[in-house]
C-alpha cells in the first residue's frame, strides 16, 4: 500500500497478517495500535464484526527499500538505512510558494496502472508528470502549469483538484476548479479535450477500465458520461442532491454514485436505469468503489462508517467502524479494495488508514493464524451465528 501527504511525503507499507492489529498514518507507523471493541447490545454486530472483534485486523509496517513490489518504483522508497522514514517526492514546482510557510502543497497525486508514471498537481496550479527510468531515476516528462512558459491551464486562479491516468497511461485527466475536466497527452503535454457542461464544482472524474469513457460527478447533482476520444457528452444522470463521487464497475458497464443525501446508487450505463439504491448511511456518502471482481461494493461516509455491499442483491454484508465508541467519529473520506480483493482500506479525515479483511477466506485465514484453539459450538453460535458444522476450522 502507498500513502502520500499534501507535502509530498510518500511511503510504502507492507501488510503483516501475523502481527498485532494496528492502524497507520502517512507520517509514520503508529505506536498506539487501534483496538477493535465489542459492539453494544443495542447495536448488534454483523458476523464480520464479530470476527473482527475476536481477531482484530492486519498490522501494517513500512516496506524496506530492498523488497518493493514490482509495480511500485523502488527509488520512491527510502534507503535501507532509513527504511522507516517517508520520502519526499522530487517535484520541481516546490520552488513556487503559495502560503506563509513558503511551501507548496500537493493537491493531487496519481500513479499509472503499470506504476511507471506519476503525476502530481500542487496548490500553485502546476501539474508535473514523471517517468521511472532504467537507472531508477525519475525523469520529468512534462510540466503543465498556470501562467508559465509551458502549457497554461486556465485563468490566474485555476487549481487542479484531482488527477487520473487513462488505463494505458497515455493520457492524464485533471479536474480544474473552473468546472471543467481537462485531458492532456502525457508524452507531448498537448491539451486534447476540455469537458464542459457542469454547473458547479466537479468532485470526481475517472476513466473507465476499458478507456472508452470518462465519468464525472458534480455538486450540480449530476453524474456525466463522456466519450474519452471525442469529448462528447454521452449520458447525464440527474439526482436529488449534490454528488461526491462516481466510479465505474470493472467491466465498464455500470457506474456507482455517492451523494450528500446519504444514498449510493448503481446505474446501468447503456440504459441509464438505476439498478440499486443503497441507503444505510446516516450522513453523506463520500466514496464508493467496486471490488475487482465486481461482486461487492464498499462505501465510505461522513457518519464514520464504511459498509460492504453485495452488488447483485443490494444487501449489506458488513459495517466497518474504526472507532465504535467515539461520540463524534471521524468521517471516512475514501474506501477501496486491494488489487486482489482480499482487503479494504479506509482513510479517515484525521489522516489515518485502517485495513480490513474483505472476504470470508481472508478472515478465516487470519483466525487460523492467530487463534490458540478451535472455537466451541457455543462460541460459533453466539459470535458468528453459525451452526457447529458450519464453524470455520481454526486449528487442525
Image (spheres, rainbow, N blue to C red):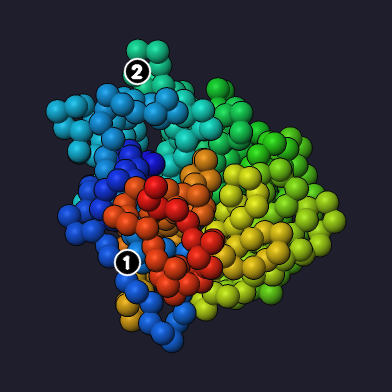
In the rendered image, residue 391, in percent from the top left (x then y), is placed at: 49, 61
166 up-or-down from 308: above or below: above
The picture quadrant where one finds residue 85 is: top left
Neighbour tally class for label 1: few under 14, some 14-19, many 20 plus, Cα within 10 Å: many
Closer-to-camera residue (60/53): 53
Q: Position of residue 77 (x, y in %)?
A: 29, 31
Cα–Cα gap, marks 2 and 1: 41 Å
Crowding at dot 2, Cα within 10 Å, few <14 / some 14-19 / many 20+, comes out as: few
Q: Secondary structure at mark 2?
A: loop
Outermost residue, top side: 135
209, 366: nearer the viewer: 366
Percent coordinates x, y for residue 32 in the rendering? 19, 59
Residue at far right of view: 271
- Quadrant position of the N terminus in the picture: top left
Residue 243 can be seen, yes or no: no
Say whether residue 44 is left or right of residue 212: left
Please tell me the numbered disc located at residue 136. Answer: 2
Residue 90 in the image: x percent, y percent? 31, 31
Q: How many marks?
A: 2
Residue at 40% in and 16% down: 133
Q: Find residue 37 and report its image quarter.
A: bottom left
Q: Residue at x 27, y 62 (%)?
A: 34
Q: Is residue 239 visible?
A: yes
Q: Quadrant of residue 208?
A: top right
Q: Which residue is mark 1?
A: 36
Is residue 368 rendered to the left or right of residue 276?
A: left
The residue lying at 25 percent from left, 31 percent from top is 64
Amino acid at each position: 500500500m502507498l500513502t502520500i501527504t499534501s507535502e509530498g511525503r510518500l511511503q510504502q507499507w507492507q501488510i503483516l497478517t501475523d502481527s498485532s492489529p494496528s492502524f497507520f498514518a502517512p507520517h509514520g507507523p503508529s505506536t498506539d495500535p487501534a483496538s477493535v471493541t465489542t459492539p453494544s447490545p443495542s447495536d448488534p454486530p454483523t458476523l464480520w464484526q464479530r470476527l473482527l472483534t475476536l481477531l482484530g485486523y492486519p498490522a501494517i509496517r513500512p516496506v524496506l527499500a530492498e523488497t518493493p513490489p514490482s509495480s511500485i518504483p523502488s527509488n520512491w522508497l527510502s534507503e535501507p538505512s532509513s527504511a522507516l522514514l517517508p520520502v519526499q517526492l522530487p517535484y520541481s514546482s516546490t520552488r513556487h510558494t503559495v502560503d506563509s510557510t513558503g511551501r507548496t502543497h500537493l493537491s493531487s497525486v496519481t500513479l499509472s496502472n503499470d506504476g511507471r508514471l506519476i503525476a502530481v498537481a500542487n496548490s500553485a496550479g502546476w501539474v508535473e508528470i514523471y517517468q521511472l527510468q532504467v537507472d531508477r531515476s525519475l525523469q520529468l516528462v512534462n510540466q503543465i502549469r498556470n501562467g508559465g512558459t509551458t502549457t497554461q491551464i486556465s485563468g490566474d486562479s485555476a487549481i487542479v483538484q484531482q488527477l487520473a491516468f487513462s488505463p494505458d497511461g497515455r493520457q492524464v485527466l485533471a479536474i480544474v476548479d473552473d468546472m471543467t475536466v481537462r485531458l492532456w497527452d502525457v508524452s507531448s503535454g498537448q491539451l486534447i479535450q476540455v469537458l464542459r457542461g457542469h454547473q458547479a464544482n466537479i468532485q470526481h472524474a475517472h476513466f473507465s477500465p476499458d478507456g472508452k469513457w470518462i465519468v464525472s460527478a458534480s455538486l450540480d447533482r449530476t453524474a456525466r458520461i463522456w466519450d474519452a476520444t471525442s469529448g462528447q457528452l454521452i449520458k447525464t444522470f440527474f439526482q436529488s442532491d449534490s454528488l461526491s463521487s462516481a466510479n465505474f464497475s470493472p467491466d465498464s458497464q455500470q457506474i456507482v454514485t455517492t451523494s450528500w443525501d446519504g444514498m449510493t446508487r448503481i446505474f446501468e450505463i447503456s440504459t441509464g436505469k438505476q439498478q440499486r439504491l443503497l441507503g444505510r448511511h446516516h450522513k453523506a456518502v463520500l466514496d464508493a468503489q467496486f471490488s475487482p471482481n465486481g461482486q461487492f461494493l464498499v462505501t465510505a461516509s461522513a457518519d464514520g462508517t464504511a459498509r460492504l455491499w453485495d452488488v447483485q442483491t443490494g444487501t449489506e454484508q458488513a459495517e466497518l467502524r474504526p472507532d465504535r465508541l467515539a461520540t463524534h467519529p471521524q468521517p471516512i473520506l475514501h474506501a477501496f479494495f486491494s488489487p486482489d480483493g482480499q482487503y479494504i482500506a479506509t482513510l479517515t479525515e484525521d489522516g489515518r488508514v485502517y485495513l480490513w479483511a474483505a472476504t470470508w477466506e481472508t478472515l478465516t485465514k487470519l483466525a487460523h493464524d492467530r487463534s490458540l484453539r478451535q472455537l466451541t459450538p457455543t462460541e460459533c453460535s453466539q459470535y458468528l451465528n453459525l451452526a457447529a458444522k458450519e464453524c470455520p476450522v481454526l486449528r487442525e
